[in-house]
Image (tube, helix red, strand yellow):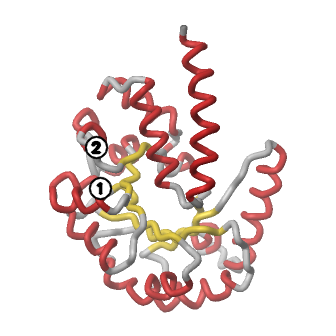
Amino acid sequence: MRFAPEHFAEYNDFDRIEVVKTVINAADRAAKEINLPINYLLTYNRMFQTAEQMIEQHKKIDKLEIPSIVGIDLAGDEVNYAPELYIPFFDYIKGLNKYKIDIHAGEITGPDQVWSAIEKLHADRIGHGISAIKDTKLLEYLKKNDIYLCQCITSNFQTGSWVDSPSHPLNDLYKMGYPVCINSDDPSVQDADLTDDYLKCVEYFDFSAEDFYKLNINAINASFISENEKRILISKFDKEYKVFLEKLK
């Protein structure tokens, strides 16, 4: 589960650390009720904090010693807040050697920002990255290094970053074998969930059940869990997929 403490705290100036604890405690209780394993990815927003403020805040979060916080994300305005502004923060995060890094890049900006996210901010995964379609060298690098592009058709249409949804890069990237997966972005903002993006993939790209199977395997491989956890999850998914196919007969 991805959430941005600053989004909950900024308007009323709530204590950011209390926000982190409150969200995680509530989500943990809810997840336990339905036996759902859950980890967390904390989002920092370019527009709300400087790199130095992010470091100061995360030092306090780190002291909470919550092992289910497995990733750190950078989101927000790509145009006016270049990746280079946040090098000190992500150097600090990388140095902790306990979190994976997800960077929103190449949604509004060109593939150069995807390169910057990888080379300067140590990105293990890219949010959106739709402009990567314009750079073959970048695509080959992503493929070679298993750096996934988490793409969001509905969100990209709503934000105007890719308004011709039937030509969305997800289709070509997937069919050419590059590392992509389908994502909902923020359901509470987009008023759309993953099912809506699945339906768009069927309507625009004629994706089949087998395509969705492969894309879900991609999503598992893109996740911030251990290789052993991925193998277990893929095994469970395989079983459920076979049950699903039987129901289609």
Quadrant (top left/top right/bottom left/bottom right) for the N terminus = bottom right
Q: Which residue is mark 2?
A: 177
Q: Quadrant of residue 57?
A: bottom right
- Amino acid at dot 1: Lys
Q: Is residue 246 above or below residue 65?
A: above
Find out whether the residues at labels 2 and 1 contact each other: C-beta distance under 8 Å: yes
Q: Is residue 119 above or below residue 192?
A: below
| Secondary structure type for disc 1 | helix
Using the rendered image of the protein, determine whether residue 165 is visible from the camera's viewpoint.
Answer: yes
Of callouts 2 and 1, the N-terminal one: 1
- Left/right of residue 126 with respect to residue 161 in the rendered view: right
Q: Nearer the viewer, residue 40 or 184?
A: 40
Q: Quadrant of residue 99?
A: bottom right
Q: Position of residue 127 (x, y in %)?
A: 40, 59
Q: Position of residue 96 (x, y in %)?
A: 56, 85
- For disc 1, the neighbor class at 10 Å (few under 14, some 14 to 19, many from 20) is some
Marks 2 and 1, how far apart at CA: 8 Å
Residue plotted at (52% across, 55% down): 223
Residue plotted at (56% across, 57% down): 227
